[in-house]
Amino acid sequence: MTKTELKPILVFDSGIGGLTVLREARVLMPERHFIYVADDAGFPYGGWEEGALKERVIALFGRLLAELDPEICIIACNTAFTLVGADLRAAYPQMTFVGTVPAIKPAAERTRSGLVSVLATPGTVKRAYTRDLIQSFASQCHVRLVGSENLARMAEAYIRGDALADEAVLAEIAPCFVEAEGKRTDIVVLACTHYPFMANVFRRLAPWPVDWLDPAEAIARRARSLVPLPNGFEPLNGEDPAIFTSGRPDFATRRLMQGFGLRVMADAVSADRRERI
């Protein structure tokens, strides 16, 4: 298979959080082009009614798969995948979907205190999928689920260069820190791909040191295992396309995409179609 025959990898998120996954995937798949898709017209996903969000994402992928023909799709969004992952696989059985779920299993394996927190969006926190992960892999731990209403938006603003008040950030992460019977939370699962962008801020504001668990590398490793590596490939250079469903990313977002080696497409999902997604 020659370099020109290799299909791209599609990385999907509700906003720009999936860039944390894209960064790791590029390291492991240097022979592939990537297409980054941000459903910013639907952002944030946390407050959506489940049925409406499920319908939106399935319909959107119908158009994306038809137009872009990727090798695989990485769903770099906990809220989306925990809700609609099974439905996507059922609707498009010809496509391989790599999902993002809260890293509860590795957190349970690593914790020493047995006190683990999952920092997520409200949508991820309320999913049966998340509760099932706890039941299956962390039943011996005390797992606190913290659904932040504001942190995904705050992370988007932060990575674009906006200033955030320490007090506002601390208010979102403070519920993650639990003290019980002489023990303290020692692992916080970052169950939204937006959150790792703020990991250094979290470390600075945390009342005590914890392991902030970022699943991006594990997601990238899973994707690499599903994509064949051709013989004699050469690493690719140049920009990859980025698609925003609003069709109207602002200047700060375009500049950010350039920093990640992405070029915003002028019209991702054509205007007549955009009205229906």
Image (cartoon, helix red, strand yellow):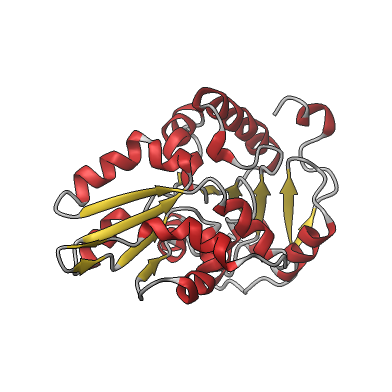
Horizontal side of residue 138 vs 240, given as left or right: left
Against 273, is 142 above or below? below
Q: Nearer the viewer, residue 147 or 222?
A: 147
Q: Residue at x 40, y 62 (%)?
A: 218
Residue 134 visible to the viewer = yes
- Count of numbered badges drawn on the protein: 0
Residue 29 visible to the viewer = no
Quadrant of image for the C terminus: top right
Q: Position of residue 273 (x, y in %)?
A: 77, 28
Q: Residue at x 67, y 32 (%)?
A: 63
Q: Quadrant of residue 130?
A: top left
Q: Position of residue 253 (x, y in %)?
A: 76, 58
Q: Nearer the viewer, residue 271 or 14?
A: 14
Q: Residue at x 79, y 55 (%)?
A: 264
Q: Position of residue 243 (x, y in %)?
A: 73, 48
Horizontal side of residue 169 vs 224, given as left or right: right
Against 19, is 238 above or below? below
Against 157, is 246 above or below? above
